[in-house]
Amino acid sequence: MKNITLTLLTAILISCTDNQNTQLTAPENPNYLFQATYSQDFTMGNPELVVKFQNLLKNCQEKKLDNLSSYFTDDVVWSLPDGNRIEGKDSVVYYLTDFWSSSATVTDYSSAVHFCVKTKEGEEWVLIWDSQTINDVGIRYQEAIAFEGSKIRFMNTFTKPRKELPTLSSRD
């Protein structure tokens, strides 16, 4: 009886261990309902580009604005949340310097998601979902940043006010 119990226990442990090593993989050619107009074939990109963007953000928050131009290509374009666009390195650096050297004060910055993807064409995009409070106004961001080599060539920023999610008890 001990041998049967030991054999069953060993079989169960082996089967549990084998299942932990199983990885799910996406099909090579998924049948998307809608085809992407830009690209739909991504792999994980260079995580150092995430760090590069985070360094830019940290320098702005800490008002270390002397070398901002080193982050951008000459023809960088920034699509702002209000629909306006800033074009060219000098204009982007001026905008950032003007905003961050003013009375902008950041508290409770947090990043919920940050990763880099690479298209089959070789373009790398950093995708960030973050939030912060600037001058007592809570803001959530979704940003897509395209890199050319190690420099930012395009930024697209969406924002919305940060509101606390209702608790289960407040939904009653």
Image (cartoon, helix red, strand yellow):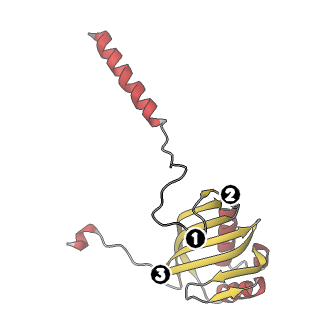
Dot 2 or dot 3, earlier in sequence:
2
Name the image quarter holding residue 9: top left
Q: What residue type is labelled 1?
A: Thr
* Label 2, residues with CA under 10 Å away: few <14, some 14-19, many ≥20: some
Per the image, label 3 sits on a secondary structure element best described as strand
Q: Which amino acid does label 3 sit on?
A: Lys
Q: Position of residue 116 (x, y in %)?
A: 62, 61
* Label 1, residues with CA under 10 Å away: few <14, some 14-19, many ≥20: few
Q: Can residue 131 be seen in this view?
A: yes
Front one among 82 and 34: 34
Name the image quarter holding residue 118: bottom right
Front one among 69 and 144: 144
- Residue at the spot 30% in from the left edge and 12% down from the top edge: 4
Front one among 41 and 64: 41
Mark carried by residue 37: 1
Q: Is residue 62 visible?
A: no
Dot 3 or dot 1, earlier in sequence:
1
- Residue at the spot 24% in from the left edge and 73% down from the top edge: 170
Dot 2 or dot 1, earlier in sequence:
1
Q: Whole-Å distance between the Cαs marked 3 and 1?
A: 26 Å
Q: Where is residue 33 in the image (x, y as percent from the top left)?
A: 45, 63
* Label 3, residues with CA under 10 Å away: few <14, some 14-19, many ≥20: few
Q: Which amino acid does label 2 sit on?
A: Asn
Q: Whole-Å distance between the Cαs marked 2 and 3?
A: 28 Å
Per the image, label 1 sits on a secondary structure element best described as loop
Q: In this view, does 125 lie above or below 3?
A: below
Quadrant location, the C terminus: bottom left
Residue carrying label 3? 160
- Residue at the spot 52% in from the left edge and 66% down from the top edge: 35
